[in-house]
Amino acid sequence: MTETQREGGYRPGYEVAAEQVLELIARLGLRPGDRMPTENDLARQLGTSRTVVREAVKILSALGRVRAQKGRGL
């Protein structure tokens, strides 16, 4: 049984990835202004695609949890 099934039903991959990104930020001890791993690195670490990571980052950005700047990364 996967994590998404245990938590009461289907959850989109980008939601799970968004939670995992926040956990990674905490685990790495990143502070505001610190650079995050690249989309490729995040996708590899989370075991998902760059598309899912991109959607997760969009959600976190809309919530004010991360800031992504074109050409500068995360």
Image (cartoon, rainbow, N blue to C red):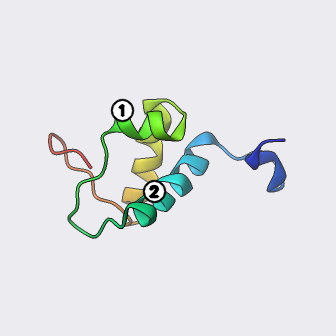
Image quadrant holding the N terminus, namely top right
Q: Is residue 46 above or below residue 20?
A: above
Q: How crowded is mark 1: few (under 14 residues within 10 Å), some or many (20 or more)?
A: some
Q: Say which element carries label 1.
A: helix
Residue sticking out furthest to the front: 28
Q: Which residue is located at x 47 percent, y 47 percent?
A: 56
Badge number at residue 24: 2
Q: Which residue is located at x 30 percent, y 40 percent?
A: 38
Drawn side of residue 31 relative to residue 58, left or right: left
Residue 2's spot in the image, x, y percent?
Answer: 78, 42
Residue 7's spot in the image, x, y percent?
Answer: 79, 56
Residue 59's spot in the image, x, y percent?
Answer: 45, 54
Q: Nearer the viewer, residue 60 or 2?
A: 2
Drawn side of residue 7 relative to residue 69, left or right: right
Residue sticking out furthest to the left: 71
Drawn side of residue 55 relative to residue 36, left or right: right
Q: Is residue 11 above or below residue 52?
A: below
Give yes or no for contact between labels 1 and 2 (Cβ–Cβ under 8 Å): no
The amino acid at mark 2 is: Leu
Q: Which of 50 and 59 is in front in this view?
A: 50
Q: Nearer the viewer, residue 62 or 5?
A: 5
Q: Nearer the viewer, residue 44 or 33?
A: 44
Residue 49's spot in the image, x, y percent?
Answer: 49, 29
The amino acid at mark 1 is: Asn
Name the quadrant containing residue 63.
bottom left
Q: First in sequence: mark 1 or mark 2? A: 2
Name the quadrant containing residue 67.
bottom left
Badge number at residue 40: 1
Q: Say which element carries label 2.
A: helix
Q: Is residue 43 above or below residue 3?
A: above
Q: Residues within 10 Å of mark 2 (few under 14, many from 20)?
A: some
Q: Which residue is located at x 26 percent, y 69 percent?
A: 32
